[in-house]
């Protein structure tokens, strides 16, 4: 199956943050990584494309979404859930 | 300085195909937003919009015209006909060269782009209709109006995303004020409710899937609309000399640039445009009773706009009314300022302030009188119309009741 979900998400986030994947740690927030609201929307688009899933996210109410973006680890967990749910 | 008055108006939008129906909807707080009817709607995640329904272009235009008129041009011509029919102006003589056309549109012939991309990319065709270019160009609406009515003065189109119509009407105002024209046909139009037009907006993740609820704490985004509104702007003495009915006076206009962010609005940029329009119109903040808000229903716009109004008006911000009619007709993007000017004229002329419908929960960050859900009677002597575009380009018009 190749790279894990975690590795692929870290690669996407690192690219958005213009960092090396090794510089991204699981407990960081997008804010820590310097990713703004546009960067977030772009990251979600990249995740949807990479995993062929739909991510429920509305920039007007990021907290209201089931998709937890509070840290890199939370995003990995949320994507794993969506992959299981939508591709299972 | 020459003064500028409005002596004609016309519209077609989700609330109605004419002025009377639209104003009735404003008074009744009726919502024109509903299920989108368009090709491949099942592949969209946003399926609602302020769509012009019950519309049959073939009943209004012949085949040759439809070959040249994109939907946004059709809307413009329909609204222009209402504004100019029976206006009493004769454009066959000298007035022709003193009359121009300035319209706002963000996307121009979006449906034409969409249909022809489908044809060449999806269906693999290698030929398109010969009129694709003249049909889709942003200036097509202004050009067709100039040809239809023999208007030979300064004419062009303005594209500044969601502020296009306000920028267009501001140019028309200043062209008359500075003496470059005596009469201007102005306003704006948008017809972006095609599969590609909605899909593009979907990508930005700022659209609501259920309703446009400006200023409400539970707002969750904007809803696209479509349509046009067109106005006849006229030099005051010219209008008075011929005994024209004056709907309102345009007294001020200001435009600013945030120079900050391609999508996030700026309180300073918006406030400078508001203050600039007051100054240009020789208005004191206390003179303004009503503001037609940009009020998109996004989290970002509404709080920034309220903060800008509070900053520009100080204590008076608590005494004025501010409503967003986008809750009813949706966001017409480049045409929105034009349709919203109808609500300003209604407030000045009829003393009725259109409401912000869909308002469910107060938001402490939008703590102004947003005229929730129900229209209100009020004597309004002066009002503003705000438009703040993506790209940080702001345009605010100031109006007074007819002199």
Image: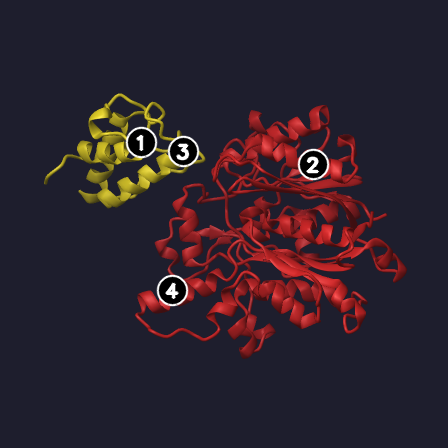
Co-location on one chain, circles 4 and 2:
yes
Q: Nearer the viewer, mark 4 or mark 2?
A: 2
Is residue B138 at least partly visible in the picture? yes
Question: In the shown orientation, is residue B79 left or right of residue B42?
Answer: right
Q: Nearer the viewer, mark 3 or mark 1?
A: 1
Numbered tag placed on residue B117 in the rendering:
4
Characterize the local packing of mark 1: few (<14), some (14-19) or many (20 or more) Cα atoms within 10 angstroms.
many
Question: In the shown orientation, is residue B250 left or right of residue B296?
Answer: right
Image point (65%, 71%), residue name: B147
Q: State the image coordinates of residue B263 (x, y, percent, origin top left).
A: 48, 39
- Quarter occupied by the N terminus of chain A: top left
Is residue B16 at least partly visible in the picture? no
Q: Give the chain letter at badge 1.
A: A
Q: Nearer the viewer, mark 4 or mark 1?
A: 1
Image point (48%, 57%), residue name: B193
Q: Which residue is mark 1?
A: A17
Q: Which residue is mark 2?
A: B276
Image point (31%, 69%), residue name: B123
- Assess whether mark 2 and mark 1 are in contact (beta carbons under 8 angstroms): no
Spatial CA span between label 4 and label 2: 42 Å
Spatial CA span between label 3 and label 1: 12 Å
Secondary structure beneath label 1: helix
Secondary structure beneath label 2: helix
């Amino acid at each position: 199956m190749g790279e894990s979900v975690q590795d692929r998400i870290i690669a996407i986030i690192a690219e958005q943050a213009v960092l090396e994947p090794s510089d991204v740690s699981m407990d960081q927030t997008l804010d820590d990584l310097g990713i703004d609201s546009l960067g977030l929307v772009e990251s979600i688009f990249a995740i949807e494309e990479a995993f062929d899933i739909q991510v429920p996210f509305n920039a007007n109410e990021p907290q209201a979404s089931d998709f937890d973006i509070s840290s890199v680890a939370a995003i990995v967990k949320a994507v794993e859930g969506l992959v299981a749910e939508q591709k299972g | 300085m020459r003064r500028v008055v409005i002596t004609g108006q016309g519209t077609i939008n989700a609330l109605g195909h004419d002025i009377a129906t639209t104003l009735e909807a404003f008074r009744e707080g009726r919502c024109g937003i509903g299920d989108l009817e368009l090709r491949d709607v099942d592949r969209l995640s946003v399926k609602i919009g302020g769509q012009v329904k019950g519309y049959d272009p073939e009943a209004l235009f012949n085949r040759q015209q439809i070959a040249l008129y994109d939907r946004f041009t059709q809307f413009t011509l329909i609204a222009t006909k209402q504004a100019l029919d029976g206006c009493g102006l004769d454009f066959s003589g000298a007035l022709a060269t003193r009359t121009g056309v300035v319209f706002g549109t963000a996307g121009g012939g979006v449906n034409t782009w969409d249909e022809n991309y489908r044809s060449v990319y999806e269906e693999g065709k290698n030929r398109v209709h010969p009129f694709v270019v003249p049909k889709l160009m942003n200036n097509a609406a202004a050009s067709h109006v100039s040809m239809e009515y023999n208007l030979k003065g300064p004419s062009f189109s303005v594209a500044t995303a969601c502020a296009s119509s306000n920028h267009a009407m501001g140019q028309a105002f200043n062209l008359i004020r500075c003496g470059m024209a005596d009469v201007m046909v102005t306003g704006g139009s948008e017809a972006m409710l095609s599969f590609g037009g909605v899909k593009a907006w979907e990508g930005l993740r700022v659209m609501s899937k259920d309703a446009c609820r400006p200023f409400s704490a539970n707002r969750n985004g904007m809803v696209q609309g479509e349509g046009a509104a067109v106005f006849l702007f006229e030099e005051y003495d010219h209008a008075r000399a011929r005994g024209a009915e004056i709907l309102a006076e345009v007294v001020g206009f200001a435009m600013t640039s945030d120079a900050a962010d391609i999508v996030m609005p700026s309180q300073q940029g918006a406030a400078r445009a508001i203050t600039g329009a007051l100054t240009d119109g020789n208005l004191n903040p206390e003179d303004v009773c009503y503001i037609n808000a940009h009020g998109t229903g996004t989290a970002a716009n509404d709080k920034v706009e309220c903060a800008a109004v509070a900053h520009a008006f100080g204590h008076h911000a608590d005494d004025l009314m501010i409503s967003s009619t986008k809750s009813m007709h949706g966001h017409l993007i480049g045409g929105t300022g034009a349709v919203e000017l109808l609500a300003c004229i209604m407030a000045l002329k009829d003393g009725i302030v259109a409401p912000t419908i869909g308002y469910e929960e107060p938001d402490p960050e939008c703590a102004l009188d947003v005229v929730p859900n129900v229209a209100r009677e009020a004597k309004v002597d002066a009002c503003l119309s705000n438009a703040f575009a993506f790209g940080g380009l702001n345009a605010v018009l100031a109006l007074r009741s007819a002199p």
